[in-house]
Image: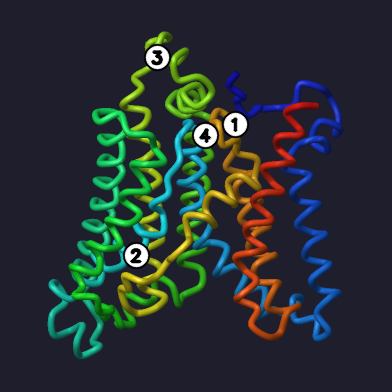
């Protein structure tokens, strides 16, 4: 059965809000933050530098996690997120080199049209990847897991071929300002979050995506255009992954085919922690953002608590958080 996000509480007062998944996540995030703050002898988690780091990490994860959430709500899954991010970074860097020429090599400011053209073409490639996923799922009748698993491996390999297995320089101050000016990625994330929330809560296509995820056969019998809806979901997911890929390239000053390994797990985990049902038809953008905050706090908090080789624990913690979130959501549905 499809579960649409509620527009307003049906009962008066504050009790419905306190019982919501979002309120529970807010409490969980505050508890995790306080626990890490107390466990860290230096209490660095309360510093301004730590807050800036959490913001920078969170907005990048949030951008592509929202795309993963839309696909999950529509009853699908996208395992290619990390590869799309890496591939988009390579494409953007190659376009900057092709269009920027000597200015890029000499670290001179790039003209606005060069950066804008490279970004727009990279985003177009992202949309094409999403449409290719839809083609594999609709026309070849491949399960979404298999279709996106194939592009997970294929796109990263293609990125290595295009880059000759080398890092492609995009080390230009004008381009890197997309990340180094802290409010730029924050503004992009804000626009993505507001746009996605309005799409899913206030528009007919958004309601149809929930219906598709809740029961695809019922949606088809109701006259919904299944192919168009799936194309919308997968294209948005790939587009947002491309946005993240551009920002990561600006962050690193290069396109790297080996980057963003495992990021699809982070995106799916954030969506699931935020309340998305892997069977489809359930989840909100607000919940996904709170899930992003949860993962950002926990993963970055590991380094504050475990001072030596903390990165070795990140995968274990991520897996445990994902398993716990799925188990909690399942228990809630059964009670």
Mark 2 crowd level (few <14, some 14–19, many ≥20, 10 Å Cα)? many
320 up-or-down from 230: above or below: below
Q: Identify whether 223 is placed above or below 285.
A: above
Q: Could you say whether the residue bearing mark 3 is in a helix, strand or loop?
A: helix
Q: Residue at x 70, y 72 (%)?
A: 301
Separation of marks 1 and 2 at Cα, in angstroms: 29 Å
Q: Is residue 268 left or right of residue 329?
A: left
Q: Bin the neighbour count of mark 3 within 10 Å (Cα to Cα): few under 14, some 14-19, many 20 and up.
A: some
- Indicate the position of residue 278 as horizontal and vertical percent values: 56, 37
Q: Who's the residue at 38% across and 16% down the image? A: 224
Residue at the disc numbered 3: 220
**Sooner in the amino-acid sequence: mark 4 or mark 2:** 4
Residue shown at 83%/67% (left/top)? Answer: 34
Query: Which one is earlier in the sequence, the residue at label 1 or at label 2?
Result: 2
As measured in the structure, the alpha-carbon distance from the residue carrying label 4 to the one carrying label 2 is 25 Å
Q: Earlier in the sequence, mark 2 or mark 3?
A: 2
How much space separates mark 4 and mark 3, taking CA atoms? Answer: 16 Å
> Which image quadrant for residue 24?
top right
Percent x, y of residue 237: 40, 46
Locate the C terminus and report the quarter of the image it occupies: top right
For mark 2, what is the residue?
86
How many neighbours does mark 4 have within 10 angstroms: few (below 14), some (14-19), or many (20 or more)?
A: many
Q: Are marks 1 and 4 in contact (CB under 8 Å)?
A: yes
The colour mode here is: rainbow
Q: Secondary structure at mark 1?
A: loop
- Disc 1 designates what residue? 282
Residue occupied by mark 4? 73
Q: Earlier in the sequence, mark 1 or mark 4?
A: 4
Q: Residue at x 75, y 81 (%)?
A: 44
């Amino acid at each position: 059965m499809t579960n649409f996000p509620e527009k307003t509480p049906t009962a008066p007062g504050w009790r419905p809000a306190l019982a919501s998944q979002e309120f529970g996540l807010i409490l969980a995030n505050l508890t995790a933050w306080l626990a890490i703050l107390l466990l860290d002898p230096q209490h660095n988690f309360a510093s301004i530098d730590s807050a800036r780091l959490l913001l920078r990490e969170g907005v990048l994860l949030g951008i592509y996690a929202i795309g993963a959430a839309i696909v999950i709500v529509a009853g699908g899954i996208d395992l290619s997120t990390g590869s799309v991010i890496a591939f988009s970074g390579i494409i953007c860097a190659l376009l900057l080199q092709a269009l920027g020429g000597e200015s890029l090599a000499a670290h001179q400011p790039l003209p606005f049209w060069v950066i804008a053209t490279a970004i727009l073409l990279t985003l177009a490639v992202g949309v094409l990847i999403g449409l290719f996923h839809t083609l594999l799922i609709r026309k070849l009748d491949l399960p979404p897991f298999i279709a996106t698993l194939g592009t997970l491996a294929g796109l990263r390999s293609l990125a290595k071929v295009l880059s000759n297995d080398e890092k492609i320089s995009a080390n230009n101050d004008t381009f890197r300002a997309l990340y180094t000016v802290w409010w730029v990625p924050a503004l992009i994330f804000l626009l993505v979050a507001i746009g996605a929330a309005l799409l899913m809560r206030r528009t007919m296509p958004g309601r149809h995506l929930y219906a598709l995820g809740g029961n695809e056969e019922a949606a088809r019998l109701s006259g919904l255009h299944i192919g168009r809806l799936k194309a919308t979901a997968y294209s948005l997911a790939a587009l947002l992954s491309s946005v993240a890929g551009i920002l990561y390239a600006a962050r690193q000053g290069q396109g790297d085919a080996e980057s963003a390994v495992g990021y699809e797990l982070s995106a799916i985990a954030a969506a699931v922690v935020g309340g998305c049902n892997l069977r489809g038809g359930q989840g909100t953008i607000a919940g996904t953002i709170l899930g992003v905050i949860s993962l950002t706090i926990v993963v970055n908090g590991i380094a504050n608590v475990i001072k030596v080789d903390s990165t070795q624990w990140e995968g274990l913690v991520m897996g445990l958080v994902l398993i716990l979130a799925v188990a909690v959501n399942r228990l809630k549905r059964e009670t």
